[in-house]
Image (tube, grey):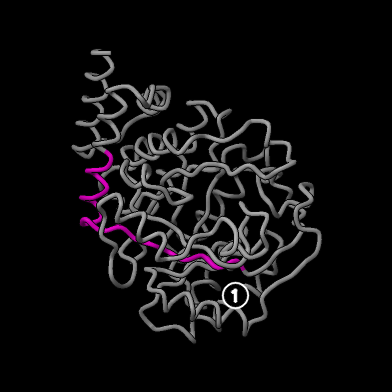
Amino acid sequence: MTESIFKVRDLVKKAAAGELLDREDLEYLFRLDHHSPAGGLLMGAADELSRSAGGGRAEIHTQIGLNLAPCPRNCRFCAFAAVNGVFREKSELSPEEAVEMARRAEAEGPNAVFLMATADYSFGRFVEIGREIRSRLKPETVLIANVGDFDEQGGRRLKEAGFAGIYHAVRLGEGRDTPIPPEKRLATFRAAREADLRLGTCVEPVGPEHTAEELAEKTLIGREARPCYSGAARRISIPGTSLENHGMVSESRMAYLVAVVRLAMGPEVIGNCTHEPNVPGAAAGANLFWAEVGSNPRDTSAETSKGRGLGVEACRKILEEADYRVLDGPSKIYG
């Protein structure tokens, strides 16, 4: 026990001094018992680092799902995957409905508004709806894209349409639980950077079967992409799917994993996220939550605000339970 406390203390000092933890450091931390005194030390240090990096403020970003479809990409963890059989019919918001939903979301006071679509959604349609929404929101509202992979031209189109950044990730099990090679995700990272779109990413979707080596690998991939935030999020089991048998990681364990990623990113990265919103995560270094409306890849409800999705006010209350104050105004993470 004493040895692990000293080891973690040294790694915390290393991270606090701005030195980057290496692969060996991360694998050690990801293997550590999160209920140990050393685990508690690490979570406390990550909490302090996040509060310092974010100026003592947390952020809430609202994500709007634009469509539902049996997606042919068939990522095994996703409710949209055609192979999972959750949604059998296609449906999508009209431009007018999307604008109205975005305006309602903006009125609730999030720090950014995300637009999300399935991987097979028309990229051109996504850009045009984004452009229309951008024109109908306040100039200071931060608009972010969560869309499938794109090239450099696609990145420029998103930027010209008024998006400030994107969410994208090389997911756990990429190329195994998904048909998408990691190289394609990395090419999108590069395309976003070339277009001056800020990148938010995350180590996700975490399941009990993922090893310390896998977690460290994806953490380092995210760090090398120079994101404005990272973090960690657990996989939500979709009933009847092939991954359901693995079960789910507890919020307690996820809070610890969020803390490890926080230390790995270094003090220059403002944001550290977790999903779904919870107090243990916020108390262990997560200073970014999402509110959700419309479709949701973790939900079997077509309208997630009636299912798993939380609103801005519910997210705010959770953050307040972790003694956070929410930033008032546009996102500084994507700023």
| Residue 84, percent from left and from top | 76, 47
Q: Residue at x 55, y 62 (%)?
A: 146
Quarter of the rendering containing residue 40: top left
| Residue 103, percent from left and from top | 49, 81
State the extent of the magenta-drawn residues as a range.
46-65
Compared to residue 50, the image places residue 105 above or below, namely: below
Q: Secondary structure at mark 1?
A: helix
Q: Is residue 196 left or right of residue 12?
A: right
Q: Residue at x 60, y 66 (%)?
A: 65
Split into 4 quadrants, where in the image is the N terminus? top left
Quarter of the rendering containing residue 68: bottom right
| Residue 335, percent from left and from top | 33, 67
**In the rendered structure, does residue 59 fall within the stretch colored magenta?**
yes
**In the rendered structure, does residue 51 fall within the stretch colored magenta?**
yes
Compared to residue 322, the image places residue 307 above or below, namely: below
Q: Is residue 323 visible?
A: yes
Q: Amino acid at mark 1?
A: Val
To which residue does mark 1 refer?
Answer: 127
Q: Residue at x 30, y 35 (%)?
A: 43
Question: Who is closer to the viewer here, 335 or 55?
Answer: 55
